[in-house]
Amino acid sequence: MRIVLLLLILNFLLLSCSLTEKPVFIEVKSINLIDTSLKNFTVQAEVLFHNPNAIGGTLQAKNIHVFVDSLDVATIESELFTIPKKESFILPLTAIIPFKKAFKDKQQDILSSILKVLSTKRIDINYKGKIRYKLGSFHYDYPLDNKQTISLKR
């Protein structure tokens, strides 16, 4: 009788506790130009998530390629990001892009490519890759493919 009662209690506890849900990917809020120098410029994507759980976990960017006007110019591998419990949060993805790679063009030299971009004052930035959520042995990969046109005006 004790074994049956113990099995019923154990079954009740297991069934009443729901497994945690993975955080919800909401959107890429923005991609912004955050710094420039003579040799490179820095862009940052703000990826918005919501964690409905009382348990956190971690997120990590895995092989996120950054494209400038369809040219693959950088790869991001982020540190582990600790997820806050029961709230929305932003995962920043920062890329430092050398002007030499970003504005390489076979018909033009780098100076004329930079001048062309500066005259239009806009470039297309595309983040492609995956962000991995991990909690214990469970993991889930969020695909990321977001393209935005950013202004070079600061």
Image (cartoon, rainbow, N blue to C red):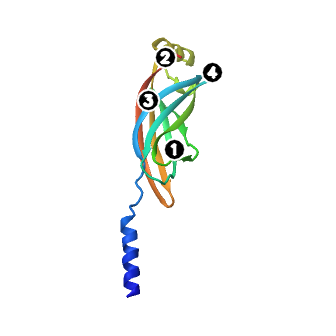
- Residue 87: give x, y in percent of width and height: 46, 44
- The answer for how far apart the CA atoms under marks 1 and 3 are is 20 Å
The kind of secondary structure element at disc 3 is loop
Q: Are marks 1 and 3 in contact (CB under 8 Å)?
A: no
- The answer for how far apart the CA atoms under marks 2 and 1 are is 29 Å
* Mark toward the start of the polypeptide (3 vs 2): 3
The kind of secondary structure element at disc 4 is loop
User: Could you say which disc has been placed on residue 117 in the image?
Assistant: 2
The N terminus: image quadrant: bottom left
User: Could you say which disc has been placed on residue 61 in the image?
Assistant: 1
User: Could you say which disc has been placed on residue 147 in the image?
Assistant: none
- Residue 35: give x, y in percent of width and height: 59, 24
Q: What count of labels does the image hold? A: 4
* Badge 2 density bin: few <14, some 14–19, many ≥20, Cα 10 Å: few
Q: Are marks 4 and 1 in contact (CB under 8 Å)?
A: no
The kind of secondary structure element at disc 1 is strand
* Badge 1 density bin: few <14, some 14–19, many ≥20, Cα 10 Å: many
The residue carrying mark 3 is: 70
- Residue 39: give x, y in percent of width and height: 63, 23
Report the amino acid beneath label 1: Ala
* Badge 4 density bin: few <14, some 14–19, many ≥20, Cα 10 Å: few
The residue carrying mark 4 is: 37
Foreground disc of the pair 2, 1: 1
The relative height of residue 49 versus residue 69 in the rendered view (above or below) is below
- Residue 102: give x, y in percent of width and height: 53, 26
- The answer for how far apart the CA atoms under marks 3 and 2 are is 14 Å
